[in-house]
Image (cartoon, helix red, strand yellow):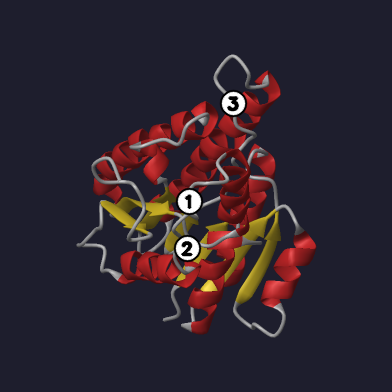
Amino acid sequence: MTKSILVTGASSGIGRAVAELFLGRGWTVGLLARRAEKLAQIAEGQRRAVVLPADVTDPAAVEAAFDRFCTEAGRIDVVFNNAGIFTPPGTIDEIALEDWFAAVNVNLNGMFLCARAGFARMRHQNPRGGRIINNGSIAAHVPRPNSVPYAATKAAITGLTKSLSLDGRAYDIACGQIDIGNARTPMVADLAQRQAEAQPDAPPMDTFDVADAARSVLHMAELPLEANVQFMTVMATKMPYIGRG
């Protein structure tokens, strides 16, 4: 039986890399993001791609997207809960309130809504169960300077992951978290440019191929439900993460 995964934030970056890898491995893949035209590009020529244009912060749109995917795929085996944003940097007193609320709305509320929708369907499908993989960040453990909204919301995802992992046991729903550091994506390219402008004499930011992050998600997703990667960190080897860098 063909396995199925719904990927949020599938139009670019890590989400797109994951979606394309899973399509290449024969999975039925739900492509959820706001930009329908970007999703259509990924789905072109892919018989098992399901385009799901939706805003993860819109509860009704999320529910409708999950309903459609389950109808077309037959069931939902995995949710890669990935959609997120990085707002402009600043100390807490400099951060615009609209940026704080936007980060909370996408990075936390959006991930809650998609986890909620996935959990409900996995709980009641036959055979029941499935897996939710939350895209956290090493920012949950070691934040960048001037990144209160991102660091706070990603730390909250760790709590979401633990609670889902605990509550899902009774329903054969596994939940794990992948913390990805400096995969080469448009978001990381923007961060690298900001760093270079702020510190021209600093060495370039260390990054790694986003395809390797996608393969890490695949490893988590392919496990039988009796096994779970609770937390995984995959990052550029020379990132200043351990110790003082």
Q: Residue furthest right?
A: 37
**Point 59% across, 33% down: residue:** 103
Q: Residue at x 29, y 44 (%)?
A: 165
Q: Which label's residue is closer to the chain start, 2 or 1?
A: 2
Secondary structure under tag 1 reads helix
- Name the outermost residue toward the left: 226
Query: Which tag, 3 or 1, sits closer to the chain's start?
Result: 3
Of the residues shown, which amino acid type is indicated by label 1?
Gly
Name which residue type carries label 3: Gly
Tell me the mark number nearer the camera, choosing from 3 and 2. Answer: 3
Residues 121 and 4: in front is 4
Tell me if I can see residue 74 in this picture.
no
Residue bearing the label numbered 3: 90
- Look at 49% across and 47% down and name the residue there: 202
Cβ atoms under marks 2 and 1 closer than 8 Å: yes
Task: Name which of mark 3 and mark 2 comes first in the sequence.
Answer: 2
Q: Compared with residue 207, is residue 165 higher up or lower down, i.e. above or below?
A: above
Instruction: Look at the numbered discs 3 and 2 and tell me whether their residues touch, using CB distance below 8 Å.
Output: no
Residue 232 position, x and y percent, is 29, 55
In the visual, does 200 lie left or right of 141? right
State how far apart marks 3 and 1 are (Cα): 34 Å
Amino acid tagged 2: Ile
The answer to whether 45 appears left or right of 165 in the picture is: right
Find numbered disc 3 in the image and state the secondary structure of the residue it sits on.
Answer: loop
Q: Which residue is mark 1?
A: 118
Q: How packed is label 1: few (under 14 Cα within 10 Å), some, or many (20 or more)?
A: many
